[in-house]
Amino acid sequence: MFAGSKRFPNGLTHYFTICTKPNSYNLRSFKKIAVDSDRGISDAKSIRFTGRRLGHTQLQPVGETQSVESPRIQHRPNTQFYPYPYPYPYPWENSLDIYYYHLMSTQSAAPTAETGEIPAPSGKLIKADSIAAKFRSDIEQTIRERTSSAGRKPKLVGILATDSKPSESYAEFTQKTCDSIGVDFVLKRVGGAVVTKEGDQEIRGVNGEGVEEAIIEANEDSNIDGIMVYYPIFGGLQDHYLQQVVSPFKDVEGLHSKFHFHLYHNVRFIRPKTLLSSSPFGSISPSSVAAANTKSIQQDDTPPPGTVKSIIPCTPLAIVKCLEYLGVYNTILSYGDRAYGKTITVINRSEVVGRPLAALLANDGARVFSVDIDSIQEYTKRPTSNTNAGPRRLYHPRHVVHPCSNTLEECLALSDVVISAVPSVNYKVKTANLKDGCVCVNISSEKNFEKEVRDKASLYLPSVGKVTIMMLLRNLMRLCQYQDILREENSQASVASV
């Protein structure tokens, strides 16, 4: 390997690197570039470098080979030229000698020869793996401690009741993650997920058949710590009913109405025994809980004595954790108000993800536009005007919802963050409507953003699935804590009654 450089009056540095590599290159992010002789390379007026992606980002040369003269290198016949956007050294050895040409600027990006304009930088693609890894080590440690104290691994049961391919894939992914992290995962197949053979013929069960019985059986099994059901099954109200059949002490997905009540009312800390009561607050008045909760929010996220954090639906929670990782949340601000100053658009107001996510973000201080097929709503906990009773307060104890007359395009133009959850292959958020430098998050199984989204977005997160699984397992360990607290309280009550 050999590298040389030559300084030219216009402030650009030309790097010439001799490398050895076969004729295929697994490279990314190549751009067409033309180099003129007035940049210091003689006999190069007709040189053009063209890279195009073929298959698995394989780069192949296009165009005739030209010669380059430089006092620092010697030209070899039949050498091919490639633009390369990364600094040397290159980890390639043996085979053909290749000249690589790397054009760098000590002050700014080099303008293209065709337009004379400096190309705009593209935003950064963020993978969910790096975010999930941030939580994995803590969850693994908690699982090891729980396994040691309880004498067995935490047990999670997944109930699959349909022939849905996405649900099947999600179940397999859950199984793989649980096996690797130390959780005992059991997949129970019922209804449409069961296939029986009669002779040479395969017969599949009816979607949804037996799912309620499977949930009740898991509720009653003391060796099962958590239950997850792969929705949708029936859709609509019938699925909502099944979500209430799951015991709140085993609901790792956080879909039970008690947890939704806590989320919408901004109740962050609870006493586990209240989950047994018909009232979300048990024997405690809602006003006293709200007052204590508001006070604790203004300080930090440490639960007040006798309380623990409430379960939050795992997908909305995963998105919040992603936004914290991406720097959208301001950690200098008080806990419970760290999204203050951010405007966020959430597309799709579903009861499972969209609506609770909008409420969660608004309760953290953000101004949220909740967009659905027939309306747009604004979620905020900050009053929009002074009241007759006195001066404007800092914020409501929880978010309030207002109708919004903005169009989707107007919402996008204002938004620092855009989150889309539309389950349609045909739906796309138009890049042209995005605010420059915004953060875009796709939580749909389909790609809701256009290919050129990073032309406008500074950060783009195409999926959150791996973070959602981490939050689900974190909820599992919190439910184990609930059960331990409840057993301890029952034990103390039994002793006191003797």
Image (cartoon, grey):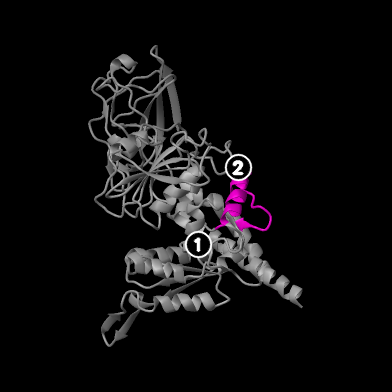
Outermost residue on the bottom side: it is 199
The answer to whether residue 170 is above or below residue 324 is below
Residue type of the residue flagged with mark 2: Gln
Spatial CA span between label 2 and label 1: 23 Å
Per the rendered image, the range of residues in magenta is: 286-310
Magenta stretch holds residue 303 = yes
The answer to whether residue 101 is above or below residue 146 is above
Quadrant in the picture for residue 126: top left
Q: Dividing the image into 4 quarters, which one contains the C terminus? A: bottom right
Tell me the SS state at disc 2: helix
Residue 149 pos. (x, y %): 68, 68
Residue type of the residue flagged with mark 1: Lys
For image coordinates 57% across by 37% down, the residue present is: 333
Residue 176: give its label.
none
Magenta stretch holds residue 321 = no
Quadrant in the picture for residue 484: bottom right
Q: Nearer the viewer, residue 216 or 83?
A: 216
**Residue 479 visible within the image:** yes
**Residue 168 visible within the image:** no
Outermost residue on the front side: it is 388
What residue does disc 1 label? 258
Q: Dividing the image into 4 quarters, which one contains the N terminus? A: top left
